Image (cartoon, grey):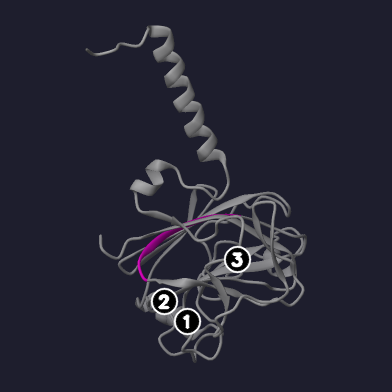
Amino acid sequence: MQTRLSPLLSLACLIFLATTSAVVADTPNQLTEEEKAGGWKLLFDGKSTQGWHTFKKDTFPAKGWEVQDTWFHGVGQGGGDILSDGEFDQFELQWEWKIAPEGNSGLKYFVLETRNAPLGHEYQMIDEEREADGKTFGKHSTGSFYDVLKPTIRPTVKPAGEINQSRILVKGNRVEHWLNGVKLLEYSCSSEVVKAAVAQSKFKNVSSFGDRVKGHILLQEHGKGVWFRNLKIRDLSGQ
């Protein structure tokens, strides 16, 4: 015998499920069921430093980084950059961030530990109001491919201390940089445009720089406070 719910009870169940889903979606550093089904994974659980290490070491830095109120916080005290344990080739990555006044940081991808330094394609994040590099629209603006390509439009960056949302898409050789729902930059790895831009940059003598490679994700600590959370990635290499 099939038991049928009363209309009021059915409505209450629907409201409960919708509310629960909304709470999960709004809780930092968690995946919704839809995200899990879509192949998304967390790079930061909001509670620990698990999954991250210092360049060319197996350990996490002893100072300079902390987990603070759901945020991965680079406190700007010489902790250095940190790298994801995992490596990624083609992917979609999204995260939230905020930065201290006069702050200058970035998220790098395609980072190889076979190099002498933690270099990679960098999504620049900067205090556009106070930091000197941020005041001039160019290759050091938020959302740029740092020192290589400037955004195609001037980014609308929320002020220091407020939360911005960023996204990087790498599919084939196509790379996209997004900020707060707006696409700022699109480029093709190894293209003549990128090769020419790299040749004019500080990375001109770095072998294979500008190519798409399988590498680590890096969070930069650059002397000022920076906060990251909701670091979510999905592998697109098999699609």
Boundaries of the magenta span: 89-96
Task: State the residue position of label 2.
Answer: 194
Query: Which quadrant holds residue 169?
Result: bottom left
SS label for mark 1? helix
- Of tags 3 and 1, which is closer to the observer? 3
- Of tags 3 and 2, which is closer to the observer? 3
SS label for mark 3? loop
Image height of 56 relative to 151, above or below: below
Task: State the residue position of label 1.
Answer: 198
User: Residue 194 location in percent, x, y?
Assistant: 41, 76
Q: Residue at x 50, y 31 (%)?
A: 20
**Mark 3 and mark 2: Cα distance apart in space:** 34 Å
> On the rendered image, what quadrant is the N terminus found in?
top left
Q: Amino acid at mark 2?
A: Val
Q: Is residue 238 left or right of residue 170?
A: left
In the rendered structure, does residue 80 fall within the stretch colored magenta? no
Q: Is residue 138 left or right of residue 78?
A: left
Label 3 crowding class (10 Å Cα cut-off): few <14, some 14-19, many 20+? some
Task: State the residue position of label 3.
Answer: 49
**Mark 2 and mark 1: Cα distance apart in space:** 6 Å
Q: Are marks 2 and 1 in contact (CB under 8 Å)?
A: yes
